[in-house]
Image (cartoon, grey):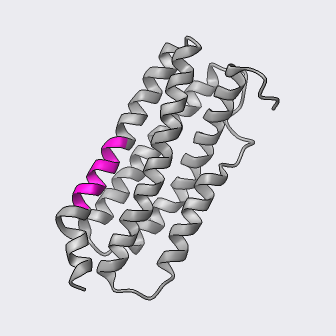
């Protein structure tokens, strides 16, 4: 796609987010499986449910555009997932693994927050108020997930990793 307009750049951003979210649908169950702390496992499972809804929202936005959601691979998300998988291949205590999982998950959340922030700004500028509302809802959920991860890490997981 020739990115010669803000509308096409917006579609490109949406395709990138769609690819990122669909990649996460595969990664989150693996992260839940690798977690030893029950709250972290539960958090990953809850975020998997949210991610499925994020995909549905993006698909609903694409239905109003003259573009399909597929056909693009988010290399950034692919790299973040690969980086997280490499860390988890290391031999480490379960408590340290949980801290590493939080770090990997927060990198993903920050990447998504940046992408959704951009998409909201483009949607608003282009007059797609309904899109902006859906994207803002997802943006807020991604931010809430990041804050939950921070609380979990700072209140328990990092302490457990320190004493492992």
Position of 40 compared to 122: left or right?
left
Residue in front for this viewpoint, 122 or 31: 122
Quadrant (top left/top right/bottom left/bottom right) for the C terminus: bottom left
Check the image and report above or below for 140 versus 112: above
Q: What is the x, y in percent for residue 73?
A: 70, 49
Q: What is the x, y in percent for residue 155?
A: 17, 63
Q: What is the x, y in percent for residue 45?
A: 36, 57
Q: Residue furthest top?
A: 127
Secondary structure mainly formed by the magenta segment = helix
Res 44 → quadrant = bottom left
Position of 72 compared to 99: left or right?
right
Quadrant (top left/top right/bottom left/bottom right) for the N terminus: top right
Q: Residue furthest left?
A: 155
Asked if the magenta segment contains residue 150, the reply would be yes
Span colored in magenta:
143-152
Check the image and report above or below for 41 versus 9: below
Who's the residue at 58% across and 32% down the image? 59
Who's the residue at 50% across and 26% down the image? 120
Who's the residue at 27% across and 52% down the image? 148
Res 62 → quadrant = top right
């Amino acid at each position: 796609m020739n990115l010669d307009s803000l509308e096409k750049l917006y579609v490109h951003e949406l395709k990138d987010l769609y690819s990122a979210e669909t990649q996460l649908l595969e990664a989150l169950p693996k992260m839940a499986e690798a977690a030893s702390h029950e709250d972290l496992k539960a958090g990953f499972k809850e975020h998997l449910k949210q991610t499925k809804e994020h995909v549905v929202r993006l698909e609903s936005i694409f239905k109003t555009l003259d573009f399909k959601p597929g056909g693009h691979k988010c290399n950034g998300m692919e790299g973040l997932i690969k980086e997280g998988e490499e860390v988890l291949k290391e031999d480490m205590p379960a408590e340290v693994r949980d801290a590493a999982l939080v770090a990997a998950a927060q990198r993903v959340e920050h990447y998504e927050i940046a992408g959704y922030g951009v998409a909201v700004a483009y949607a608003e500028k282009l007059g797609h108020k309904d899109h902006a509302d859906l994207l803002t809802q997802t943006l807020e959920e991604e931010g809430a997930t990041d804050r939950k991860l921070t609380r979990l890490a700072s209140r328990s997981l990092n302490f457990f990793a320190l004493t492992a």
